Image: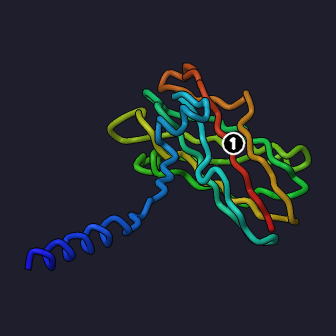
Amino acid sequence: MPLTVRHFLLVALLIVGCVELPTEAYENPLDDEEQAREGIEPPALIFSPDSVSVSSGNAVTVNVFVMGADSLRGAHLQIDYDNSLVSFTTVTIGDLFNDGTESFVMAEDDNDNGLLDVYVSFGGAGSLSVSGNGNIANITFSTLTVGKTVLTFTSASELADPNDNAIEINGYGEGVIDAQ
């Protein structure tokens, strides 16, 4: 009998030792540690997803997130893109500003130069600003041809508090749209 128990324990250990535990990839755009590895410190503007593949001719939406904002009332996002590969389609307000009763978003597209200006403002009934991390805008582009375009925030991008004072931006993420 003792030999059978030993065999059973040995087999059990082999089975348990051979089981491969799944590893999950967590892709949280607001993960401070991950962004710090990329050299991005809050307050910051980032894209999520930071890279997306899509079939040429289809539309794709990228989300703009703010990290570590304190008393954020509004933002001007100026985004540089390759106008030979993608074209701007629409913009909608993100979740961070969505609870505002008078929040708005608008865009001005300079397609000739591949520059998109997005203006977003929070207008909440109980507050003049929001703080923290969150999605402030969702931007949809249509892909025109096969290729990769890099989306970058220009230095003209701004964050502002309720008194229209600038909130310093310490980091800018990049986004990639890969049309195949």
Rendered residue at 41%/33% (across/down): 131
- Name the residue carrying label 1: 174
Q: Work out which quarter of the rendered image holds the C terminus and state it.
A: bottom right
Image quarter hosting the N terminus: bottom left
Across and down, in percent, residue 145 comes to: 88, 66
129 in relation to 82, above or below: above
- Callout 1 crowding tier (Cα within 10 Å): few <14, some 14–19, many ≥20: some
Q: Residue at x 58, y 42 (%)?
A: 120
Q: Position of residue 123 (x, y in %)?
A: 45, 40
Amino acid type, label 1 = Glu
Residue 26 coordinates in the image, percent (x, y)? 47, 54
Q: Is residue 138 left or right of residue 103?
A: right
- Which colour scheme appears in the figure? rainbow
Q: Is residue 57 visible?
A: yes
- For label 1, the SS is strand
Of residue 90 and residue 106, the one placed in the foreground of this image is 90
Q: Residue at x 27, y 74 (%)?
A: 11
